Image (spheres, rainbow, N blue to C red):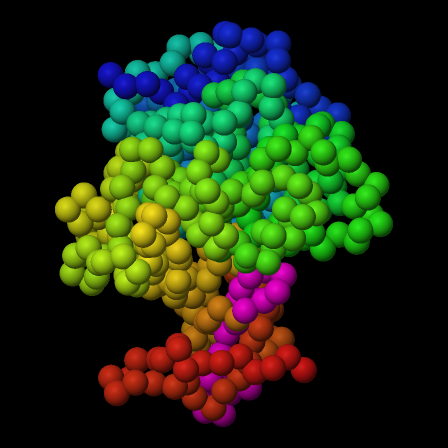
Amino acid sequence: MGRNLASLLIDTAERHGDRIAVKLDDVELNYAVIAEGSARVAGMLKAKGFQPGDRVGLMLPNVPFFPPIYYAILRAGGIVVPMNVLLKEREVKYYLEDSGAKLLFAWELFAADAEPGAAAAGAEYIRVGADFAQTAFGHEPEHAVAEVADDDTAVLLYTSGTTGSPKGAELSHGNLLANVETTLQTLIQVSEEDVILGALPLFHSFGQTCALNVATAAGCVLTLLPRFDPVKALEIIERDRVTVFEGVPTMYNALISVPDEVRARYDTSSLRLCVSGGSALPGEVLKAFDQVFGAKVLEGYGLSETSPVASFNHPDRARKVGSIGTPIRGVEMRVVDDQGNGLPTGEMGEIAIRGHNVMKGYWRKPEATAAAIRDGWFHTGDLAKVDEEGYYFILDRKKDMIIRGGYNVYPREIEEVLYEHPAVAEAAVVGVPDSEWGEEVGAAVALKQGAQADADELRAYVKERVAAYKYPRRVWLVPELPKGPTGKILKREIEAPAEQ
């Protein structure tokens, strides 16, 4: 048998249950309370007829209830389906239906979409609010930890592709434990004395592995920030003497953009290490952050399908600005051509990854799995080159994916919503460079003959139907979209008009 990912919490609670595990402003919970809470929620699951292998949706922001519910599902032998809190009703329904989840724990502020989405999928909606602890502690605790094999699925992380509907990347207990242990021992080397700022969403793979699971394994403090605000982040860094900050490039950009006179009010000298991932960190932002905060920023790379960490600028090696570093321990990376053959140093090709971090496959999608994992190598769709010292540099993406503020937006999904509008004949969604978000979502739309709609109407139409980070902020109308000889829309020829 293997080791259950929930053992990270249980082992730490046994070692030093009185240490603070999670903070949210004035709320502090120690490891013993989190562990007992997970046993109570596991008892609640048991009372509802839960069976090992069942999937459970988890739609919570960064609040102290996230860890006990997350570990409770794992403890009971279930599979966690983390969901972005910004999902709309139709998206909630899809995630629950596709995964076959019968339960959804959702934060009360998002009930307007979570509750009807769950109802439409035939899943039970469990409201999580300030009184949830009373609800959970009303159940008999289930202290047993389900036995699992290393290859048993622990988490289904949904990630879209250019083919439209999101796919559930099956991450096993073995995948996630190996990624956490490697990250803890060789990359983000934290001890129980550290304080990690949890600004990354815990429902995202980066926040889940590098913040929640790493902090829990180390027995250190995770201080939560549910919605990123740079001044609030500075306040927390000073208040809690934060030692490790983890963020996406937009967060770093926001922090260096705080006016000097405001930033000077906060003591950030406790910071010793900063980690960036999610999308490429501009070299100028990295240098400016180094200069302003005096803390080393290490950039890494990974995907939902790789648990997520695959490569890193290692703390004990030279850091190269603009590079995603070198593969982590136990992981191989190479640059390949379209046939999967390795390419020489300096040549551009697709990154392929093999190792303990690569997912089992896509949930109930054998064809998609076979297309992505070939001869044991996961093909990422990201184009890169590698230098003589083995450092990787991302050059472009093979996929059309847009990365807006660290969140992945898949054009096909947004295009399908636009095509549902009665006035739309054709639509193409593309990334538009943006100084604040890295990329903004843009949409070029051609209307049906005689139909009428303006950009504001189309934007509002999509906004109602997808998560807030996905809808196109830039929409422009065109007589027709550029096409190749086969009639395929040529996205590379689409340019966003200058903003008026």
| Quadrant into which the N terminus falls | top left
Residue range corresponding to the magenta coloring: 433-452
> How many numbered discs, if any?
0
- The residue shown at (65%, 34%) is 271
Q: Quadrant of residue 148?
A: top left
Q: Is residue 444 magenta?
A: yes
- The residue shown at (26%, 87%) is 485
Q: Position of residue 472 (x, y in %)?
A: 55, 68
- The residue shown at (39%, 77%) is 491
Where 422 falls versus 237 (above or below)?
A: below
Where 299 falls versus 468 (above or below)?
A: above
Where 24 falls versus 265 (above or below)?
A: above
Where 444 falls versus 336 (above or below)?
A: below
Q: Nearer the viewer, residue 42 or 304?
A: 304
Q: Quadrant of residue 20?
A: top right
Q: Is residue 467 magenta?
A: no
In this rendering, position of residue 157 left or right of residue 125: left
In this rendering, position of residue 248 left or right of residue 159: right
| Quadrant into which the C terminus falls | bottom right
In this rendering, position of residue 110 left or right of residue 445: right
Q: Position of residue 21 (x, y in %)?
A: 60, 20
Q: Position of residue 75 (x, y in %)?
A: 41, 19
Whether residue 257 is visible here, answered yes or no, is yes
Q: Position of residue 497 (x, y in %)?
A: 56, 83
